[in-house]
């Protein structure tokens, strides 16, 4: 495969992950804040693949695609760590404890209404013992490798 074709493949992979995430969301699995954060690098990777198609530039864009996929992987690994309680996630997303004793009833109600229903530290779905965030980390790592291969092939062709 050429560098351009590998870029298209990696962009299609990110698009597939986004479609899958939206499919899970449509099926009733509400995304948490960290789930949403993991989507943005994939959006960037899809745009980068489209730019490869439109401009024909491959190497520099493939490096950017690799960075985007790497960021998605990093966010996903962070999310897995929060799910596994290896480290704390964002307090507003991971059941951080507020000082309820000092809050007025109206402040408490405001806090409860602003609290996300979906927590970042609870796994909503697993396949083969791996959470959605875990699968995103694995898939994003594979996509980063594909983007890297695209950059390397484009560099060899130049």
Image: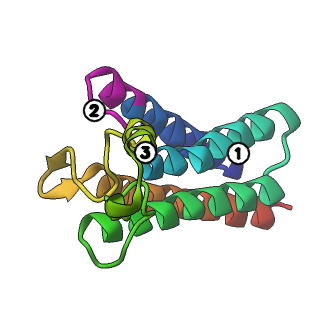
Residue, far top: 26
Chain part drawn in magenta: 22-32
The residue tagged 2 is 29
Return the disc, 3 or 1, that comes first in the chain's sequence: 1
Q: Which element carries disc 2, helix, strand or loop? A: loop
Q: Tell me where residue 103 appears, x and y as whole percent.
A: 41, 55
Q: Nearer the viewer, residue 12 or 75?
A: 75
The residue tagged 1 is 4
Confirm or deny contact between disc 1 and disc 2 (CB under 8 A).
Answer: no
Q: Is residue 22 above or below residue 34?
A: above
The residue tagged 3 is 111
Confirm or deny contact between disc 3 and disc 1 (CB under 8 A).
Answer: no
Q: Tell me where residue 104 appears, x and y as whole percent.
A: 41, 48
Return the disc, 2 or 3, that comes first in the chain's sequence: 2
Q: Tell me where residue 38 appears, x and y as whole percent.
A: 50, 51
Scheme by which the image is coloured: rainbow
Q: Quadrant of the C terminus?
A: bottom right
């Amino acid at each position: 495969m050429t560098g351009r074709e590998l870029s298209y493949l990696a962009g299609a992979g990110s698009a597939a992950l986004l479609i899958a995430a939206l499919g899970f969301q449509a099926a009733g699995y509400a995304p948490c804040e960290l789930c949403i954060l993991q989507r943005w690098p994939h959006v960037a990777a899809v745009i980068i693949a489209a730019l490869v198609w439109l401009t024909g530039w491959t190497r520099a864009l493939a490096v950017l695609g690799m960075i985007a996929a790497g960021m998605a992987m990093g966010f996903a690994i962070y999310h897995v760590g929060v799910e596994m309680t290896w480290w704390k996630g964002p307090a507003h997303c991971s059941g951080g404890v507020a000082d309820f004793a000092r809050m007025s009833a109206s402040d408490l109600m405001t806090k409860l209404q602003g609290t996300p229903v979906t927590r970042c530290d609870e796994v909503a779905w697993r396949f083969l013992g791996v959470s959605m965030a875990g699968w995103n980390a694995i898939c994003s790592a594979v996509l980063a490798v594909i983007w890297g291969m695209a950059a390397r092939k484009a560099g060899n062709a130049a």
